Image: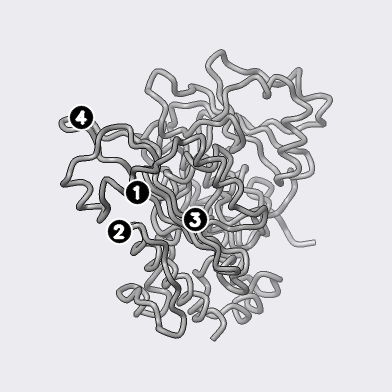
């Protein structure tokens, strides 16, 4: 058995403890880890515990955890299921001073939540990841899932953006991943890199094979109030296309404020297009009827992902294409989103939204063609 570092639990020759920063965070982070995750060689909760001054890692049999679980009055649980609120939308006085994060596989974290009633009583918060996880040595449950260290950093960037060292914590995580991928004899090492070429290594996994269950979507946000601070609001239009069967979704929603002529021109729509606009609740119902369980909703930018959360619910996930590292792909993708005539798809007639949808469909098809070429 190789000589091992029992802080990062990696072989001594690829120990990365020396690159983990020590961060004076303000928000206390309580990591509740499933005991089967404790000695996993790629576990990232250890990185968080080493890096954050105000952090605690709690590991034990579930029956023993309640007596060790010391929650503050203003604690909150980072867990992406209803009724979780977006952490970025909390007012300053609503932000938790103790953030509880469950560590383990999706099944293990559900078990922890089910068996620990104290956690069920906490307010729940979620993130809207702007890019997919970089956890290339371990499978995530969905394209929008994050490792524990990535989720922790994303949350602290929202709660305490002034805190220094968070980027370095992610750098330590990246070091672990890269060392594993290049470590001789690793199942995730040289052979893995040979199987997945450099030209496709940054293409999201759902786009590498069949696009049967890929749904491309785009939404328009309402105009902000004149002179007021821009806030996050539900979409006023939403269009989508499932690439497998060509099914489309196209709907305007009742805007929160009257639409002026300038903004309508920007949308490339008319007042008649909003004559049949529906409420957000009705739009949610229609979207649920349209979407299938296996669908992977794909959007181009984080702003559309935020609009999607209003339509699909707090626990909805989507793939954000803007996070793709263009420089690692075919250079044409960074500048040319035009759709080849052989792949042309008729877009729902929704003005600017329909055009943006067609551009995103074109990008998905080009990424897929690059992956299979």
Reading the image, the residue beneath label 1 is: 220
Reading the image, the residue beneath label 2 is: 352
Dot 3: within a 10 Å radius of its alpha carbon, few (fewer than 14), some, or many (20 or more) residues? some
Measured Cα–Cα span from mark 3 to mark 4: 32 Å
Q: Nearer the viewer, mark 1 or mark 4?
A: 1
Report the residue at 76% width, 20% height from top.
66
Q: Earlier in the sequence, mark 1 or mark 2?
A: 1
Dots 2, 3 in contact, CB < 8 A: no
Dot 1: within a 10 Å radius of its alpha carbon, few (fewer than 14), some, or many (20 or more) residues? many
Q: Earlier in the sequence, mark 1 or mark 4?
A: 1
Reading the image, the residue beneath label 3 is: 249
Q: Earlier in the sequence, mark 2 or mark 3?
A: 3
Dots 1, 3 in contact, CB < 8 A: no
Dots 1, 2 in contact, CB < 8 A: yes
Q: Earlier in the sequence, mark 3 or mark 4?
A: 4
Along the line of sight, the residue nearer the viewer: 259 or 185: 259
């Amino acid at each position: 058995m190789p000589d091992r570092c029992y802080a990062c639990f990696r072989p001594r020759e690829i120990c990365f403890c020396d690159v983990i920063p020590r961060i004076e965070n303000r928000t206390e982070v309580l990591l509740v880890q499933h005991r089967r995750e404790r000695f996993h060689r790629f576990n990232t909760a250890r990185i968080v515990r080493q890096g954050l001054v105000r952090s605690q890692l709690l590991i034990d049999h579930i029956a023993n955890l309640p007596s060790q679980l010391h929650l503050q009055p203003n604690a909150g649980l980072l867990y992406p299921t209803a009724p979780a609120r977006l952490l970025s939308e909390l007012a300053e006085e609503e932000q938790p001073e103790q953030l509880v994060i469950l560590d383990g596989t999706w099944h293990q974290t559900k078990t922890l939540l089910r068996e620990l009633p104290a956690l069920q009583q906490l307010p729940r918060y979620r993130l809207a990841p702007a890019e997919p996880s970089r956890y290339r040595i371990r499978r995530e449950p969905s394209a929008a899932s994050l490792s524990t260290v990535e989720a922790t950093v994303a949350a602290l960037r929202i709660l305490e953006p002034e805190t220094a060292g968070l980027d370095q914590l992610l750098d330590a995580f990246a070091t672990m991943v890269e060392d594993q991928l290049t470590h001789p004899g690793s199942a995730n090492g040289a052979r893995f890199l040979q199987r997945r070429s450099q030209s496709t290594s940054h293409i999201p996994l759902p786009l590498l094979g069949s696009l049967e269950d890929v749904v491309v979507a785009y939404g328009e946000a309402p105009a902000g109030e004149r002179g007021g601070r821009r806030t996050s609001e539900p979409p006023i239009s939403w269009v989508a296309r499932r690439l497998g069967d060509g099914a489309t979704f196209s709907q305007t929603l009742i805007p929160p404020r009257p639409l002026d002529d300038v903004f309508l021109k920007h949308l490339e729509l008319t007042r008649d297009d909003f004559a049949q606009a529906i409420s957000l609740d009705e739009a949610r119902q229609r979207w649920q009827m349209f979407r299938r369980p296996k669908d992977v909703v794909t959007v181009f930018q984080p702003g559309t992902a935020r609009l999607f959360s209003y339509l699909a619910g707090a626990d909805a996930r989507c793939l954000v294409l803007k996070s793709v590292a263009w420089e690692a792909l075919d250079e044409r993708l960074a500048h040319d989103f035009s759709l080849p005539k052989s792949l042309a798809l008729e877009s729902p007639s929704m003005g600017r939204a329909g055009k943006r949808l067609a551009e995103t469909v074109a990008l998905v098809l080009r990424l897929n063609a690059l992956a299979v070429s």
